[in-house]
Image: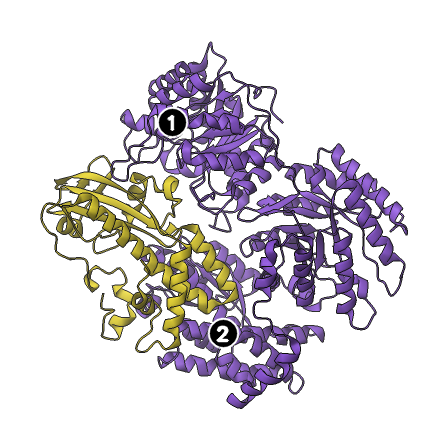
Amino acid sequence: MPSERIDFTKNRILIGAMGTVLQQRGLKPGAIPDLLNLTDPALIEGVYREYLAAGSEILYTNTFGTNARKLEKTGKSVAEVVSAAVAVARRATEGTDALVALDIGPLGELLEPLGTLPFERAYELFREVALAGAAAGADLAVVETMTDLAETRAALLAVKENTDLPVMVTMSFEENGRTFTGCTVASMARTLTGLGADAIGLNCSLGPDRLAPLLRELCENTDLPVIAKPNAGLPDPLDGHYDMDAETFAAALEPMAAAGVGVFGGCCGAGPEYIELVARRLKGKTPVPRAARRESFVCTAVKPLPITGVRVIGERINPTGKKRFQQALLENDLDYILDVAVAQEDAGADILDVNVGYPGVDEAEMLPRVVKALQGTTSLPLMLDSSNAAALEAGLRVYHGKAVVNSVNGDAEVLSRVLPIIKKYGAAVVGLTLDKSGVPQTAEQRFAIAKRILDAALSYGIAREDVWIDCLTLTVSAQQEQARETLKALRMVREELGLQTVLGVSNISFGLPNRPLVTRTFLVEALHAGLTLPILNPNQTELLDAVAAFRVLSGEDEASRAYIERFADYVAPQASAAAPKKEKAAQTAPLTLDDAIIRGLRAEAAALAREALGREDELSIVDGHLIPALDAVGEGYEAGRVFLPQLLSAAQAAQAVFEVIRESAAAKGGASVKKGALLVATVRGDVHDIGKNIVKTVLENYGYDVVDLGRDVAPEAVAAAVREKRIRLVGLSALMTTTLAAMEETVALLKTLPDPPRTFVGGAVVTAEYAARIGADYYARDAKASVEVARAVLG
Amino acid sequence: MTPDIDEILRYLRVRGEAGDLRARVERMAAELAEAVPPRWVCRAFPLSHTDGGVVLEGSGVTLAGALAQKMLGGCDTAVLLCCTLGMAFEQRVRALERRDMGAAVILDACGSAWVESGCDMACAELAERFAPRYLTDRFSPGYGDLPLSLQPAVLAALDAERRLGIHLSDSFLMTPCKSVTAVVGVSDAPQPARVRGCGFCAMRDGCEYRKGGTTCAV
């Protein structure tokens, strides 16, 4: 929605380069250009006047690096710099119609999960800038040169939630169509459009010629005005001069108007002379009418997922009826949940349903935590599954893409509670065809509810493509006629409303023998009736096989390519039963559980552990097989016969065995099988955590409960976790000499606790002497040595 | 170009015969080379030699200390270089860590070797560009007495945050992790190889090889 204050019905001309122009005028390398607003405003005003004379209609304040983090060492506050910057731009525009845009650049620090800056902290930093800009009288805000969709969302939300300023957003892409952090053009466009930007576009990184295909893609994915603010070509590798002259630049930019771009400017290397030629060609003209491709779409930053065929939603992140999952939720064991996610991704899911609702779990706190963790682990788009509006809002807020929410229903009260949240965060939504009076018995009644949900969503400004309908599967052994009603309703929704359809298929077969056969048959029928988004267990291979076959028959799988690839190694069952098996048996003795662990064979080890559970109890498997096998690998490692990757593969096979044992214990209702808790962390300032992760993997597979605080962890955070969780052993890792001081500080702080835990330290630059000097209790040379430490302290 | 397999095995602390591990490393290194091209930026600066060290004119960078003096003593120009495998590599390692930690460690080692190969490729291009003049060995903050605290100035002179997506922590660590900054001198006279051996290695204090009485042979 373009703001009343910015008229995008005519082409708009932005400012060009600021940084490179200031360098030409003597700004020292490494100096902070933002401070010139205070120290030499006349210089900045002069540059503005040149741009206004050249035809610029929107000036950017000289505040690209203005935020509390980047200004920290300058002694200047955000408010001081911003008010001076707006004032100088305002002076230059006096007597003209030109607007002043508060420029907001990247924070200079990576957000979680790529880095360690929390989203909420990034939001606060941007909020301060936005408030200062609004107070100083900027006409609009522009968030620019962003490469991380999470950071971009933080900035956009901060402006929108704290000011009335219209906001333009531009990101920087490489020629491969991705930003440095892997964000795609479609993901960016659909996410930011949904989140309510006023105009979006691309700036920096490339010249207009190379940006052209990306701008076209952007135009196909948004209805908003589109901005092009390219560099003057590419910099010379030796002297840094940009290689495209003003005439070539303007000539290359002009055709972008025909593609639908309506806002033009220049970035690095493109000074006033470039803008003058751009304005001469484009100013005042009317942008060509244009509309985004209408399609249902969800995404993460790195994975755009248009719903242009059947897309499988994995149902396994859900505690209902799963003891092991319930235990993981109650124990805050996110690792287990992440493993469930990864298994579904590897099995072929396209979207993951995320449900963490369980008695004793605060969903509004847990859902965002799980969403954050999942985004660091899987690239798949998420379906946030809850009826708790607060949990949904908290989850959507930290989801850096376009999500789908499961679900609303025909109940007016539910619709009015949830739909505003869907609209605010630009998500898609699943509507269940039920209401206060329950699930209607006829297809026609369910269709009527679907229509009601659609109308309500449209009234909130939610796009039709973003409304997905679930016609509800009932158990066929209980209500036999309902299977046909469900399929009939689904067909009506698909054919008459043209909406995407969602359906959980597994329930259909409850209470019947050979459930997979019934489930699969129902799935295939539903697909033929028009189901596009089946919710199922992707680990059930036969279900995904059926989807693969359906995609061939529907024509979605062109030339059957994916199907052929899926079954490349397929051997017909009759043929495989006899011949190869015999051969195998003749060659090798049967694999033992111990061997499978030693050789790092995960699937085999898990299967053998399941077998062993018939003969032995959980603890005897741990003590009689798992630990001796790991010790054997450990000895080989010490002796130089086994190397680190092999040690770790064995550890992960052991982890698979452990998982089988935990499942078994959880099913019996017992507490989890764990030996004792310890904490590991990479110290403050250190972002290299592979060493710590190795130690964690190995310790977990010896049965220890490892609390992992991650990387770049402040001493205070370690101490707080030790107190809260009553930790008796703490492992600290540092890779670089520059972060050793933080290790020392952490050890010292832990010693001040009333009942101090034991500490062990390790990492590339840590030595036994150093460990002793800083007062650590143990030095762990490697992961194997950390096991000895854990044994000594925790048993 | 492909990553140096022996170097990767060395990072993995494989001593003696690697057995099946070598084939696995070769396969993963080849996949990495195909999927993640190293990217680099550089800038050349004229030098002036002062009492305070070697000044890269117009860059904001001054290289104090014995190493810079020794390496650049005969040079009138130096090139600052930054090479990275980017977040794409980082994301691959993280995805693997949850699936197969052993494979993740191999990939991490492949990345260390591959970013060095990227620097080699960049230097080969520079050698061509400057021919018939000569280049010194490249050397980096953290080598010898060249402090890591130069990183902010080096990265700023290259505009590496904007052009390569490099972020620097307060303790001078770069993200993406597989990133290297380096200095290469340009001279009219052939330059001897100099930055080799334990004396220049940042790892010399905690080195497993040295503790065992040997070296890694680089």
| Position in image of residue A356 (x %, y %) | 68, 56
| Position in image of residue B32 (x %, y %) | 40, 59
* Residue type of the residue flagged with mark 2: Ala
Alpha carbon separation for disc pair 2 and 1: 57 Å
Q: Which residue is mark 2?
A: A651
How many numbered marks appear? 2
Q: Secondary structure at mark 2?
A: helix
Asked whether the viewer can see residue A780, the reply is no
Q: Is residue B33 above or below residue B167?
A: below
Identify the residue at image location x=49%, y=43%: A148
Q: Which residue is mark 1?
A: A249
| Position in image of residue A138 (x %, y %) | 51, 22
Q: Quadrant of residue A266?
A: top left
Q: Chain of mark 2?
A: A
Identify the chain drawn in yellow.
Answer: B
Q: Secondary structure at mark 1?
A: helix
| Position in image of residue A547 (x %, y %) | 68, 59
Residue B169 in the figure: left or right of residue B49: right
Query: Does the CB distance between marks 2 and 1 fall below 8 Å?
Result: no
Badge 2: residue crowd in 10 Å (few <14, some 14–19, many ≥20): many
Quarter of the picture containing the N terminus of chain A is: top right
Colour used to depict chain A in the structure image? purple
Residues indicated by labels 2 and 1 sit on the same polypeptide chain: yes
Residue B13 in the figure: left or right of residue A536: left
Identify the residue at image location x=45%, y=67%: B103
Residue positioned most to the front: A559
**First along the sequence among labels 2 and 1:** 1
Asked whether the viewer can see residue B11, the reply is yes
